[in-house]
Amino acid sequence: MNRGQQYTFLISEADIVGNKGAVAMTLRIINELDRRYKGSQFIVTTKFPTEARQLIKTSSYNIQLLPDNDQAFDLPLVKLWIWWLFKKIHINQKSLLKNNVLKAYDSADLIISTSGVSFIDDFGFIKIYHFTKYLQIPLLLGKKTIKFTQSIGPFRSLYNRCMARLTLPFLDCIIARGNHTVNSLSKIGIKNNVVNLPDIVFTLPPEYSKPAKEIVSKIKSSNIIGFCPNIVCKRLDTKNVYIESLVQLAKNVLNKYPDSSILLIPHTITEKHMGKNDDLEICKQIADQIGRPDRVFVENTILYTPNEIKWLIAQCSFFVGSRFHALVAALSSAVPCLAIGWELKYEELMDWVQIENNVLYYWNLTPEIAITMFTELYQKRKQIKQELEKKLPIIRQLALSAFDIIEELLLEKD
């Protein structure tokens, strides 16, 4: 048993600003590891160090930020490969390791990759390379490395398949968060280091906040239907039906259920200088097109913690979501859902609660299909809620078992 000891954990690919799902994963991992190994140090990579410092400045955890700007890890990786090749011929060029990135990795007892989704064909050459570099560094340094609850594959792309085979088999553990990932990895011969567990955000506790309470109080209806759109779906939707389907679905809900109100809850909001991955604007666009300000509300959640957003989502009687971790927040609060997604990870999520038919994809979406599916699920919402309440204790326990794997890896290291 190694609990009570202090360790250094490096958490890579942690987009800890803007995307509340990424924040939820990172902070939940830190929270649980600090509970088990009090006083441990956490090194967290971030592309936005200024904003990340503001996010964690009130934290009681020992967190060090490792800036990950556009080519910050590329030159260190080149130096590391040169060092590794020299080492193979028994020449130890330690001077090549005098780099902040390499020093940070080398100081860690365990590397935790938290990219959420990785090695997906659609990401293309450059993005898949970036996923590998976060793994190449610890592998070349001989560090214990775990991929934490992720969706990976399929591997139709030769490049994606090759890069996966060159890195993933050598990790100490890959925690898949669903059967699609397990099957995709198995098809390219990666089986021995794969474990299938629910996403860790299932264990995130909700947290009351004054702004969340205020928006709920402002809504006169007790029947709140939550909507969480995703700008990724809008970008990928070449038929331009995604936004229109959400608008028509919301109008249908308001007409068919006079006691209902719509609450649009953006789960990813970024400042303008931090990129274009922002759902708040499409929430406003949808609200404007619905045109019922008395029954349609948009909450700016930029200052919300993931825990506070989860509390807000938990106030809904039903949830229509396109953000993966917003759906996790709903399901783990026993709120019935309709998922409208862009990738197989949505099916993986619904598999855990055995409602895999609750998923639509942007490529086969129409207003009529969205309305029909919503109506069917909404009529069964009480039954779905009861079933969720039964399953959730087991799912949470399974999700927490990821930390037992970490404990085993730390014991091996010691």
Image: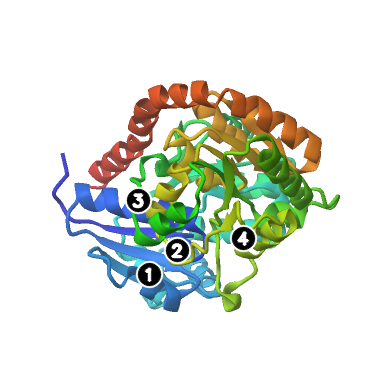
Tag 2 near tag 1, CB within 8 Å:
yes
Whole-angstrom CA distance, mark 3 to mark 4, is 23 Å
Taking 284 as reference, is 399 left or right? Answer: left
Residue type at mark 4: give it: Asp
Taking 340 as reference, is 366 left or right? Answer: right
Which residue in the structure is indicated by mark 2? 16
Query: Does residue 53 sit above or below 340 in this rendering?
Result: below
Give the total of numbered labels.
Answer: 4
Taking 263 as reference, is 202 left or right? Answer: left
- Which of the two residues, 272 or 152, is positioned nearer the viewer here? 272
As helix, strand or loop, the secondary structure at mark 3 comes to helix
What x and y, as percent, mark residue 402? 36, 38
The earlier-in-sequence mark between 1 and 3 is 3
Whole-angstrom CA distance, mark 2 to mark 3, is 12 Å
- Which of the two residues, 35 or 144, is positioned nearer the viewer here? 35
Q: Quadrant of residue 356?
A: top right
Tag 4 near tag 2, CB within 8 Å:
no
Residue type at mark 3: give it: Arg
Query: Callout 4: 10 Å neighbours few (<14), some, many (20+)?
Result: many
Which residue in the structure is indicated by mark 1? 55
Which residue in the structure is indicated by mark 4? 279
Which residue in the structure is indicated by mark 3? 28
As helix, strand or loop, the secondary structure at mark 1 comes to helix
